Image: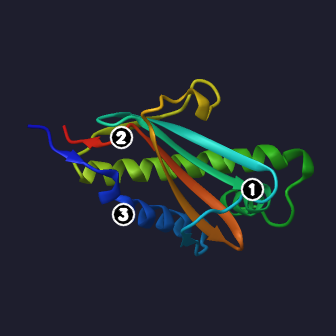
Protein backbone atom coordinates (compact mmCIF):
# COMPACT_ATOMS: atom_id res chain seq x y z
CA UNK A 1 0.00 0.00 0.00
CA UNK A 2 1.34 3.43 -0.96
CA UNK A 3 1.42 6.05 1.77
CA UNK A 4 0.76 9.63 0.66
CA UNK A 5 2.18 12.73 2.30
CA UNK A 6 0.20 15.90 1.73
CA UNK A 7 2.12 19.08 1.05
CA UNK A 8 0.06 20.82 3.74
CA UNK A 9 1.76 18.53 6.29
CA UNK A 10 5.17 20.00 5.46
CA UNK A 11 4.21 23.59 4.66
CA UNK A 12 5.55 24.95 7.97
CA UNK A 13 8.83 23.10 7.50
CA UNK A 14 9.20 24.54 3.99
CA UNK A 15 8.53 28.04 5.35
CA UNK A 16 11.12 27.55 8.10
CA UNK A 17 13.68 26.16 5.65
CA UNK A 18 13.25 29.08 3.24
CA UNK A 19 13.33 31.64 6.05
CA UNK A 20 16.51 30.09 7.45
CA UNK A 21 18.18 30.12 4.01
CA UNK A 22 17.32 33.78 3.52
CA UNK A 23 18.77 34.57 6.96
CA UNK A 24 21.96 32.55 6.49
CA UNK A 25 22.56 33.57 2.88
CA UNK A 26 21.64 37.25 3.12
CA UNK A 27 22.39 37.89 6.80
CA UNK A 28 18.96 39.51 7.02
CA UNK A 29 15.71 38.57 8.74
CA UNK A 30 12.89 37.96 6.27
CA UNK A 31 9.44 37.75 7.83
CA UNK A 32 7.00 35.13 6.60
CA UNK A 33 3.83 36.85 5.45
CA UNK A 34 0.35 35.57 4.63
CA UNK A 35 -2.07 37.15 2.19
CA UNK A 36 -1.78 38.74 -1.22
CA UNK A 37 1.28 40.83 -2.02
CA UNK A 38 2.66 42.55 -5.09
CA UNK A 39 6.25 42.62 -6.28
CA UNK A 40 7.53 46.19 -6.56
CA UNK A 41 9.19 47.32 -9.78
CA UNK A 42 10.62 45.12 -12.50
CA UNK A 43 10.13 41.45 -11.63
CA UNK A 44 12.93 38.90 -11.79
CA UNK A 45 12.50 35.15 -11.45
CA UNK A 46 14.52 31.93 -11.49
CA UNK A 47 13.36 28.32 -11.42
CA UNK A 48 14.68 24.81 -10.85
CA UNK A 49 13.01 21.59 -11.98
CA UNK A 50 12.08 18.85 -9.47
CA UNK A 51 11.97 15.21 -10.59
CA UNK A 52 11.65 11.92 -8.73
CA UNK A 53 8.94 10.68 -6.36
CA UNK A 54 7.30 14.05 -6.97
CA UNK A 55 7.61 16.37 -9.92
CA UNK A 56 7.41 20.12 -10.06
CA UNK A 57 9.20 23.44 -9.99
CA UNK A 58 10.81 25.64 -7.36
CA UNK A 59 10.59 29.27 -8.44
CA UNK A 60 11.78 32.43 -6.72
CA UNK A 61 10.53 35.90 -7.67
CA UNK A 62 11.30 39.41 -6.48
CA UNK A 63 11.61 42.99 -7.68
CA UNK A 64 14.63 44.93 -8.83
CA UNK A 65 15.20 46.92 -5.62
CA UNK A 66 15.52 43.86 -3.39
CA UNK A 67 17.29 42.06 -6.24
CA UNK A 68 20.06 44.66 -6.19
CA UNK A 69 20.38 44.35 -2.40
CA UNK A 70 20.53 40.55 -2.62
CA UNK A 71 23.08 40.71 -5.47
CA UNK A 72 25.32 43.02 -3.44
CA UNK A 73 25.19 40.65 -0.46
CA UNK A 74 25.70 37.43 -2.41
CA UNK A 75 28.41 38.84 -4.69
CA UNK A 76 30.03 40.63 -1.73
CA UNK A 77 29.99 43.95 -3.59
CA UNK A 78 30.64 47.22 -1.79
CA UNK A 79 28.90 50.31 -3.16
CA UNK A 80 26.84 50.47 -6.32
CA UNK A 81 26.72 47.78 -9.00
CA UNK A 82 27.67 49.34 -12.37
CA UNK A 83 24.63 49.87 -14.64
CA UNK A 84 26.02 47.56 -17.35
CA UNK A 85 26.38 44.71 -14.81
CA UNK A 86 23.07 45.24 -13.00
CA UNK A 87 20.84 42.74 -14.83
CA UNK A 88 23.50 40.02 -14.96
CA UNK A 89 24.36 40.52 -11.26
CA UNK A 90 20.72 40.31 -10.15
CA UNK A 91 20.06 37.33 -12.44
CA UNK A 92 23.19 35.44 -11.34
CA UNK A 93 22.53 35.94 -7.63
CA UNK A 94 18.86 35.01 -8.07
CA UNK A 95 19.76 31.78 -9.88
CA UNK A 96 22.20 30.89 -7.10
CA UNK A 97 19.64 31.68 -4.37
CA UNK A 98 17.05 29.52 -6.18
CA UNK A 99 19.60 26.70 -6.39
CA UNK A 100 20.35 26.99 -2.64
CA UNK A 101 16.64 26.90 -1.77
CA UNK A 102 15.93 23.96 -4.09
CA UNK A 103 18.94 22.06 -2.73
CA UNK A 104 17.83 22.57 0.87
CA UNK A 105 14.28 21.51 0.01
CA UNK A 106 15.77 18.33 -1.47
CA UNK A 107 17.36 17.63 1.93
CA UNK A 108 14.05 18.36 3.69
CA UNK A 109 12.17 15.96 1.40
CA UNK A 110 14.84 13.27 1.80
CA UNK A 111 14.25 13.40 5.58
CA UNK A 112 10.64 12.52 4.78
CA UNK A 113 11.78 9.62 2.56
CA UNK A 114 10.67 11.46 -0.59
CA UNK A 115 13.34 11.03 -3.26
CA UNK A 116 13.76 14.07 -5.53
CA UNK A 117 16.40 15.56 -7.77
CA UNK A 118 16.77 19.14 -8.94
CA UNK A 119 18.02 20.34 -12.30
CA UNK A 120 18.07 23.38 -14.54
CA UNK A 121 15.51 23.93 -17.26
CA UNK A 122 16.82 23.53 -20.80
CA UNK A 123 15.00 26.72 -21.71
CA UNK A 124 13.41 29.59 -19.78
CA UNK A 125 10.67 28.39 -17.41
CA UNK A 126 7.16 29.37 -18.48
CA UNK A 127 4.33 28.71 -16.02
CA UNK A 128 1.91 28.24 -18.93
CA UNK A 129 3.74 25.06 -19.96
CA UNK A 130 2.87 23.27 -16.70
CA UNK A 131 0.23 20.57 -16.64
CA UNK A 132 -2.98 21.64 -14.88
CA UNK A 133 -2.47 18.93 -12.26
CA UNK A 134 0.26 21.00 -10.61
CA UNK A 135 -0.65 22.63 -7.33
CA UNK A 136 0.84 26.05 -6.62
CA UNK A 137 1.99 26.87 -3.08
CA UNK A 138 3.23 30.43 -2.52
CA UNK A 139 5.56 31.36 0.34
CA UNK A 140 5.81 35.13 0.90
CA UNK A 141 8.69 36.76 2.74
CA UNK A 142 9.06 40.47 3.46
CA UNK A 143 12.59 41.84 3.52
CA UNK A 144 13.11 45.59 3.99
CA UNK A 145 9.50 46.24 2.85
CA UNK A 146 10.06 44.21 -0.33
CA UNK A 147 8.45 40.93 -1.29
CA UNK A 148 10.39 37.75 -1.97
CA UNK A 149 8.24 34.86 -3.20
CA UNK A 150 9.24 31.22 -3.19
CA UNK A 151 6.72 29.21 -5.18
CA UNK A 152 6.38 25.44 -5.38
CA UNK A 153 4.52 23.90 -8.28
CA UNK A 154 3.96 20.27 -7.25
CA UNK A 155 2.16 17.41 -8.96
CA UNK A 156 -0.40 17.10 -6.19
CA UNK A 157 0.70 14.77 -3.42
CA UNK A 158 4.10 13.58 -2.31
CA UNK A 159 4.51 9.86 -2.71
CA UNK A 160 6.88 7.95 -0.46
CA UNK A 161 8.99 5.43 -2.41
Q: Taking 72 as reference, is 121 left or right?
A: left
Quarter of image, res 142: bottom right
Residue labelled with disc 1: 63
**Residue 78 at x, y percent in the picture:** 80, 66
First reached walking from the N terminus: tag 1 or tag 2: 1
Nearer the observer, 37 or 120: 37
**Residue 39 at x, y percent in the picture:** 72, 58
Nearer the observer, 159 or 82: 159
Do labels 1 and 2 touch, CB within 8 Å?
no
Q: Which mark is in front, 2 or 3?
A: 2
Where does the N terminus fall, quadrant-wise?
top left
Q: Tag 2: Cα neighbours inside 10 Å, few (<14), some, or many (≥20)?
A: some
Farthest residue in the top direction? 122
First reached walking from the N terminus: tag 3 or tag 1: 3
**Res. 45 mark:** none
Residue labelled with disc 3: 13
Residue 125 visible within the image: no
Q: Taking 159 as reference, is 41 left or right?
A: right
Amino acid sequence: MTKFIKLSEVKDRVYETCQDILKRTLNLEAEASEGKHEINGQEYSAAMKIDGSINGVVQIKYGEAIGIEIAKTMLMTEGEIPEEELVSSVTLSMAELCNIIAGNLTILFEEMKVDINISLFEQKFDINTLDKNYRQIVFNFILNNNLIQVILFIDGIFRKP
